[in-house]
Amino acid sequence: MDLEKIDTSFWLTKDKAWMEQRKAQWPEIERAVGLNRRKSETNGLKQYYLRGKMINWEKYRNWNELFHPFDLAMFLWLHPSNDYEVLKALQRCYMESRLPRPRGTIAGYGSFLGHEFMRASGPYKSLAKYPYPYMGEKNIILFRVLFNDLAYAKDKIGSMENYSKMTKNPFEYLGYHHFFYMRAWLLQDSKLPLCVNNLYQYDDVVEWSLTTLTTEHEDEFFG
């Protein structure tokens, strides 16, 4: 699969009801994804979300800013499919491609962990006050796509040069801090969408979280 020529049949652009629904959902998504992106970059995401149109990858070939305009997490989240196998193939396509460069992959893992573990466990009383991407029920599918094959992911990210160990290895940096976020989730109003869809409710997520508890991070937790 070529990242510039992915299967766009998932975008039902000739289905009026489907398009109206996507357009109706976009403003809420735009509010979150536009937080750290320029207007032109946000518009690029909009075209992908609505029509499956890819951004101009060459424009971002040497991108070196903290927030990538089209990172791996955005690429998967904004895709219409919720099918694990479809999204897994897209993840491989993205990570194997020369187009996004290392920053797109690393930023994708980092933003997913930041949004779905750290921020989604915060004391937000409503989604209207939550200024970050809300992935809803799709978050567990994306977690499994990104983390089920850790050997592959670690090999790909670990082979990326010119990045610090902490940046290129997002699989351990939360470490013992998972306990803080688990506690914060348990203190949330159980009726709130952020609580209902929190990743810590899933056994495989908790099992993965425990693998990040290393002696290297003990001082950060107990200090």
Image: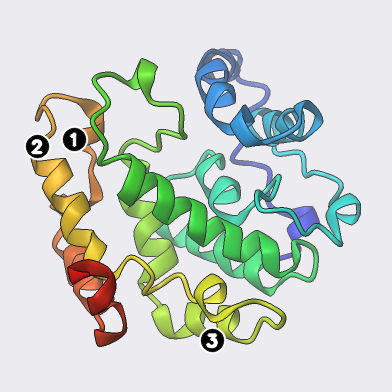
Decide which of tag 1 and tag 3 comes sooner along the chain.
3
Q: Position of residue 158 (x, y in %)?
A: 57, 84
Quarter in which the C terminus is drawn: bottom left
Three-letter residue code for mark 3 = Asp
> Dot 3 lies on which element?
helix
Residues under numbered marks 3 and 2 in contact, where contact means CB atoms less than 8 Å apart: no
Name the residue rendered at 35%, 53% in the picture: 141
Vertical comparison of 166 with 110: above or below = below
Vertical comparison of 134 with 79: above or below = above
Q: Is residue 83 visible?
A: no
Q: Position of residue 157 (x, y in %)?
A: 58, 78
Residue nearest the observer in this picture, 140 or 193: 193
Rendering quarter of residue 54: top right
Decide which of tag 3 and tag 2 comes sooner along the chain.
3
Task: Give the CA distance from mark 3 to mark 2.
Answer: 37 Å
In this rendering, the label closer to the viewer, 1 or 2? 2
Rendering quarter of residue 115: top left
In this rendering, the label closer to the viewer, 3 or 2? 2
Q: Which circle marks residue 155 in the picture?
A: 3
The crowd level at tag 2 (other Cα within 10 Å; few <14, some 14-19, many 20+) is few
Three-letter residue code for mark 2 = Leu
Q: Give the residue pinned by disc 2.
A: 187
Task: Give the CA distance from mark 1 to mark 3.
Answer: 33 Å
Q: Is residue 184 left or right of residue 117?
A: left
Q: Position of residue 48 (x, y in %)?
A: 69, 36
Q: Which circle marks residue 195 in the picture?
A: 1
The crowd level at tag 3 (other Cα within 10 Å; few <14, some 14-19, many 20+) is few
